[in-house]
Image (spheres, rainbow, N blue to C red):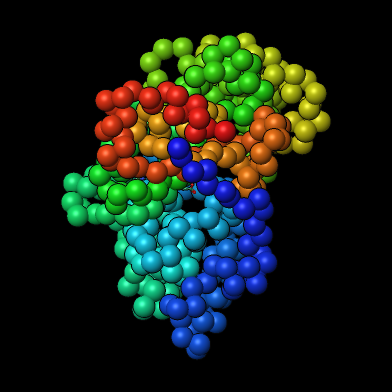
Amino acid sequence: MVAVTQLPSFVDLTNFSFLADHCLDPSLNTKASLETSFLQMKGLAKEMYESPPKIIRSANGGFSYPANPEVLAYLVEQVRGKVFLEIAGGFGYHGLFLALAGAQKVYMNDSAPEAIAVFDREKACLRPEILARIETIAGDAFELLTKNPNLKADVILCRNFIHFLTDAEQARLIDMMKKILNPGGTVIFTANGAYDSDSREIHKTDPSKTCFVLEQARFLSKETDICLASTTSLCPGEFTPRQTQKTQVYRREEGGSWGQLPTPDLSPQIFDKIKKWVGENKPILKQHKSGRIQNSKNEVRLYTKQTLADLLTQHGFSVSTTFVTDAKGHNVPEGEDPYLRGKQTGAIATFHAAAASAAVVEEPAEGAAAAAAP
Ligand SMILES: C[S@@+](CC[C@H](N)C(=O)[O-])C[C@H]1O[C@@H](n2cnc3c(N)ncnc32)[C@H](O)[C@@H]1O
């Protein structure tokens, strides 16, 4: 029987008495340094809380999304006196926050030099006692154990990374995490959610699907960059992530007229949406001396709570909770339809090596998945 993890229903990181009373570890701080730590925690909370997505400039960067404050509050409880590792952690604010909250050791990994530079700069501002607890592990997540064979952690966070990976890469990453985890350790995964209306239609007939084609049309000019249409469809063949195909649909050179370009690769749904937008927004187009409408298409995993729980269960984890977050990073309350405003989906799971090998012999994995996922 897996214990269900209760996440707080709403956490406000701008409520500074919450930070002072709940998050800051008083045993780590002398009276004199408590205020400095508190100010640093406040600064980090501001960066992470309900913040707009920040772009991470690198080949596989993507965006850094706001923290889920409810999960962060749960993590504070989990990591005090324990070892925390974040994989593909972007700018690494979670690790810095959790070091101030009393983690015994924090490891932060990412492969993007820009993200690591931000993390190292922020880290250097911490007091030496806190700084000594933090270690940057720059580079490929898949090489974490090869390069650090003794790496061990009690809690591993992996936000918004696995949806870029193929089945084989996911299996390799999860196997590596199982080796890093101390017995009974916890993982927290988040991934892009499948909570738009197109994927709802797909999941009505195919609830186990995770591989999707995302198409987005953007209007790009010197002044604006807005998403004007998007569609989600099922991935037709083998899943090939991390290859974005970009097509120009309309273009206007400085002061000329808007010209439609040949659009051989567009799906009819998105082409219709773009045409409709162009028809309805002629005044907006006229205001821009130059610009373009571009369609980008890529393949990505999109998870529901159930499909993410299934992935972890298949790899021997016991899932204790699943959650969906909104655009600001907060949990969408249980009972509310996630298709209304769900963005990311997440799961908390533990790994007990002995239980996982027993499960392989007795084969109860599917029933366990169904029981574990709310
Ligand atoms: C969508 S961002 C998510 C960042 C962060 N976890 C968050 O949620 O804000 C994906 C991150 O994965 C990192 N990344 C991509 N490939 C990686 C790899 N092979 N090893 C480590 N990090 C990687 C990128 O640099 C980027 O920071």
Q: Is residue 63 visible?
A: no
Q: Relative to residue 353, is residue 64 drawn left or right?
A: right
Front residue (pair 208, 290) = 208
Q: Is residue 236 above or below residue 169?
A: above
Who's the residue at 32% across and 42% down the image? Answer: 352
Who's the residue at 68% across and 42% down the image? Answer: 333
Front residue (pair 358, 185) = 358
Q: Is residue 26 above or below residue 144?
A: below
Task: Ligand 1: give its quadrant.
Answer: top left
Rendering coords of residue 287 (x, y %): 77, 36
Front residue (pair 275, 257) = 275
Who's the residue at 58% across and 18% down the image? Answer: 203
Rendering coords of residue 303 (x, y %): 52, 29
Q: Is residue 374 above or below residue 263?
A: below
Who's the residue at 49% across and 33% down the image? Answer: 372
Q: Relative to residue 183, is residue 94 drawn left or right?
A: right
Residue most extreme to the bottom: 32
Quarter of the image for residue 123 reads: bottom left
Q: Is residue 157 above or below residue 373?
A: below
Q: Is residue 228 visible?
A: yes
Looking at the rendered image, the quarter that the C terminus falls into is top right
Front residue (pair 229, 334) = 334
